[in-house]
Image: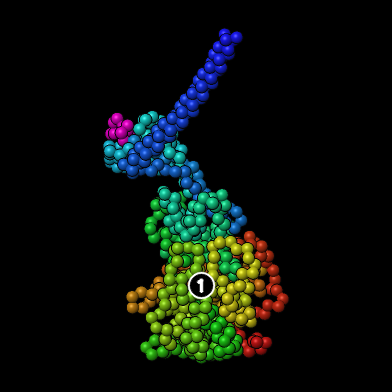
Amino acid sequence: MEQAAVRKLDGKRREGLQMARQRLIGALVIFAVCFSFLALRALDLGLAMELVEVTKRDRTVLPQLASRSEIIDRNGVVLATNMEMQSLSADPRQVKDAAELTDRLVKVMPDLNYNQIYNRLTSSAKFVWIKRQLTPEEVYNANAIGDPALQFHKEEKRVYPKGALAAHVLGYVGVDRNGLGGIERYMNDRLSDEAYIEEPYQLSLDVRIQHALEDEMMATMQKHEALGGAGLVMDVRTGEVLAMASLPDFDPNNASASPKSHFFNRATQGVYELGSTFKTFTVAQGLDDGTITLNSRYDATEPLRIGRFRIHDDHPQKRWLNVPEIYAYSSNIGAARIVDDIGYDEQQMFMRDLGLLSPASIELSEVGAPLLPERWSRVQGMTISYGHGLAVSPVQLGSAIASMVNGGFHNPATLVRNDDNQQLVQAKQVISSKTSAQIRRLMRLVVEEGTGSQADVAGYLVGGKTGTAEKSVAGGYNEKAVMASFVGVFPMDDPRYLVFTIFDEPKGTKDTFNFVGGGWVSAPTVGRVIARIAPMLGVKPRQKPKGFQTLSLPVVEENLSHE
């Protein structure tokens, strides 16, 4: 019995020891796992701190694969996109023979500067750039060198598939992929926002209209040897810009290859005295406030003397003219007399309502401020009535003229597509619908029988106004250097689109009898643009619509009796 009890006790002791041993082994395993995790974490933190210190000492951050939203036109055509590229760097510490490696690099990439590359390869840095954004051929040749000191890095390059088309609207980016001009600069935060990378940024531009405008403008510049030009096509109902051109231009794919002067945006940044196009505003204001009617007549028999100033007409009729004749014959004398009746404070307020006294609110950083007279006195008011003494940008003029023909609503120009058909309802009304209808008839008269006849296009009922302004110089104006412009609108019975062009110092030709005014240089250009783009915009040619009353020269009271 005693032996049985001892054996039983020994069994229990062995079981206890076995259980204790198992618990101890389990604890040791858990301790080992925890210790290993802590050791690895410490090692990881140590390596991370070492990497931070190396980065701080080296002061070099390797390129990250960045991206930007695509830019597309109103129909979804890609205007700016991204392409994966390879860039080449080197670690000078691994370079065995800097002179030999420099020779080989310059041989396969001749645009590299030998001394600059050699200095980089012999520096104490741990990372130096050799060249960013290599071509496929350069990648192949650099890779064939086979030097372990060389390294390739993936980057993205901004690419503009249409080349120089709409360059001033799009702008360009630097090597760091930040916008340096145009929409790329103005909308840089939106285009580089990771939340919108997959969402293209849509403009109001139409590449078909843009190409037609630039093509016709370039032909005119070459024919008349002009220093430059600007143009735009705008939807008069919404303010959307379908095309905007500034010549000479540049290729945003290789912006550094163009002269600095080519980056100046003549359409938004340039401000010019735009001549007789301003008579549209003078006549519209007089009609709208009741100062004049279409039957009103003014004495244009002799030049108008105001103190030491003398106002004369380029196409003198030397008789009394009624309002349509003043507008169609582009009488400076008549316009000056009209504004004399309107009042100069009222004229200034009207110009402000049209957005002509402050920079355009378009989506570009390259926007010029209007040049205003120091004093808005009688003389200044008279010269402004026919487009001298106040300099504005082409895009400002386009917006203001649009409000004259669209029923009287002023919409600031925009480069962003807007599908809001209620925009005109929300816009500020600057003249009545009745006055707008009268202006449409007057603009059609200019093209049918006045100074803008060369802008006429059969079937499209084009209206417009010429502008010829001598360039201002110190102490006065240069009679031999002019800015020739024309603003056209179609169709005048139901205005939808505006086309404007201006050319800097055009030269006369045999075809123009050596004349260089807006009617000889810009009006034909606008006519050709309209003939090309009207079918694209769905405007069908047609005979004179019923209900649209035209005028004819000479304008007599019988023609205006219904007014």
Amino acid type shown at disc 1: Leu
Q: What stretch is highlighted in magenta?
A: 92-104
Seen at 39% across and 60% down, the residue is: 261
Q: Tell me the quarter of the image containing the C terminus.
A: bottom right
- Residue 305 visible in image: yes
Front residue of this view, candidates 497 and 50: 50
Residue 472 location (% of width, % of height): 38, 75
- Residue 40 visible in image: no
Residue 59 belongs to the span the image colors magenta = no
Residue 130 location (% of width, % of height): 36, 40
Q: Count every numbered label the image shows and give the total.
A: 1
Q: Tell me the quarter of the image containing the N terminus.
A: top right
Front residue of this view, candidates 389 and 471: 389
Q: Mark 1 points at which residue?
A: 397
Front residue of this view, candidates 544 and 265: 265
Indicate the quadrant where residue 557 lies: bottom right
Q: Predominant secondary structure in magenta?
A: helix
Seen at 54% across and 79% down, the residue is: 280
Indicate the quadrant where residue 118 lies: top left
* Secondary structure found at label 1: helix
Asked if 336 appears above or below 85 in the picture, the reply is: below
